[in-house]
Image (cartoon, rainbow, N blue to C red):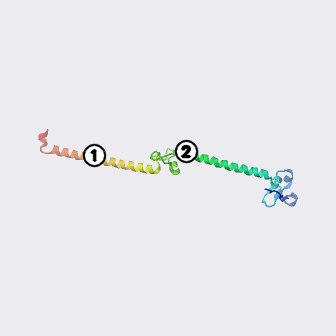
Amino acid sequence: MASRGRLPLLRPLHPDRGDHAGVAARTRPGRARFWRFGRDHREPLLDAIGNVRRDAYLARRRQAAREEEQRRAEREAAAREARRPVCADCGRKFTDDRWERIEARGWDQPRESHPHLCEDCQSRAVAAQQQAEADERERQEQQRRLQEQEAGQAVQKAGGWLSRFRA
């Protein structure tokens, strides 16, 4: 970029001086045939001279594109947050890991036991479910023992010497 009041120093690259530009450089005007001091590459004449207005325009355009990309990324992030599931028990939003685990999977993948709950509420629900199952097993065991005891008492009563008089 040329600054005001200064001229860029250019060196034309000629094919007869070993610059290897050849005949194509003389016939095609857009070819990189000039080297501007301070730069490490060849450029066409208009790029080597520089155009302050064009450079400013391109910089503004790049900045606008970056800002638009940033706004688009923010919109996508907001839309993703709006889709984020919420725990049915406590109302907290799911973490990214939890959200990923409850996403729909293939038929061969195991499903989550409580996909509508966050991790804390799920652990409490699983513990409560296990406790309820253990209580149910204990109740059934007590009921079975009581039935065995009653059956044993009925056999004892039926087999005694006084049972003849009851019937």
Identify the residue shown where x is 84% and y is 53%: 25
Please report whichever mark, 2 or 1, sits nearer to the chain's N-terminal start: 2
Q: Which residue is mark 2?
A: 82
Q: Is residue 2 left or right of residue 116?
A: right
- Quarter occupied by the C terminus: top left
The residue that appears at 26% across and 48% down in the rendered structure is 145
Residue closest to the eye, 69 or 139: 69
Along the viewing direction, whichever of 146 and 62 lies nearer the viewer: 62
C-alpha distance separating marks 2 and 1:
51 Å
Q: Quadrant of residue 2?
A: bottom right
Residue at (71% x, 50% y) in the render: 62
Under circle 2, the secondary element is: helix
* Residue at figure coordinates x 69%, y 48% from the top left: 65
Indicate which disc residue 143 carries.
Answer: 1
Question: Does residue 30 appear to the left or right of 150 in the view shown?
Answer: right
Give x and y (percent) for residue 26: 86, 53
Q: Position of residue 23 (x, y in %)?
A: 86, 53
Q: Is residue 98 visible?
A: yes
Q: Residues within 10 Å of mark 2 (few under 14, many from 20)?
A: few
- Residue at the farthest front position: 5
Quarter of the N terminus within the rendering = bottom right
